[in-house]
Image (cartoon, grey):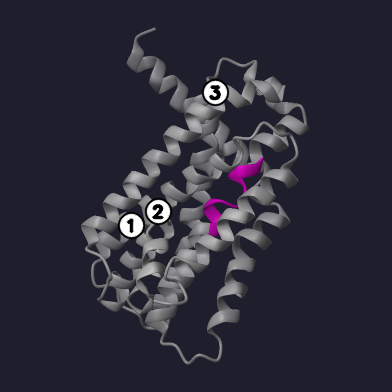
Amino acid sequence: MPETALVREQMRRSLVIARKDIRIYYSKGPVIIFGVLFPVFLFLSFTIGRHLSVDFMIPGLLGMVLFFTATSISPIVVPWEAQAKTLERLMSCPVRIETIIVGDILASFAFGLGISLVPIILGLFLGITVASPLIFAIAVILAALCFASLGPVFSIPPTNLPATINMIASVVKFPVVFISGIFIPLDELPAWGQAVAYISPLTYFTDIARYSIQGRGHLPVAVDLLALLAFTSLFLVVALKLHQKTMPRRI
């Protein structure tokens, strides 16, 4: 089979795996609670009573919802299926390990992108305006792909216990939220706080969202987009390469 035809066939199988993940996992209660409701209530707990403007709140809310939804289930799909003995059956099919991981990423990407429309529509209803719709749309799509690619990185350790992977993901995800300029703008952070914020991909999306909605950002838009692209590439390479080594050890 020609190389291009082989790639198309594996991509088609990734889409089938993505549909399977959405159908089985993304309608479950824990995904809605920890992927949608939890970031919303966490955000509200830090903003209620501070008399913040809507155009300040919506970029932070959008960043949190997109980050948590795109990483809500992708870290635990592989250990969950390994525990249920369905991963072994999947790996016995004519699919590559990379195909399985890409399918999980596509499902997370679609879920995160779809749920992100809720705070966007809410913001438009409350009267915000998007100054650069094209840049904003590109940023949302790229950030959804970036965060979805981060999810499988958490599940690299070859354990079949979803609780263990969830703990690893939580240790990373919660600090990331607080260092990414969601609650305190980057301009108001000290130099050491800004240096820490730059290691978070969420920082760059939040900065673009603030630029698009508030008309001001801390970094040039090109830098934000390139940073998101670089993080996406890094997460993809790490997830695909290391899962090749650890996934066979799960069966």
Percent of width and height locating residue 135? 25, 60
Can you name the residue that lies furthest to the front here? 192
Magenta span covers which residues? Answer: 68-76
* 93 and 197: which is toward the camera: 197
Main SS, magenta region, reads: helix
Q: Residues within 10 Å of mark 2 (few under 14, many from 20)?
A: many
Give SS at disc 1: helix
The answer to which image quadrant residue 205 occupies is bottom left
Left or right of 76 on screen, residue 245:
left
Three-letter code, disc 2: Ala
Location of residue 52 (image quadrant): bottom left
Please report the residue visible at 39 percent of the width from the left and 68 percent of the height from the top. Answer: 192
Q: Which residue is mark 1?
A: 139
- In which quadrant will I find the C terminus? top right
Separation of marks 2 and 1 at Cα, in angstroms: 6 Å
Q: Nearer the viewer, residue 31 or 163?
A: 163
Q: Quadrant of the N terminus?
A: top left
Residue 233 vs residue 37: left or right? left
Please, what secondary structure does the residue beneath circle 3 have? helix
Checking the image for residue 244, the label placed there is 3
Q: What amino acid is found at the position of numbered circle 3 in the picture?
A: Gln
- Say the numbered circle drawn on residue 143: 2
Q: Position of residue 206 (x, y in %)?
A: 38, 66
Quarter of image, res 152: top right
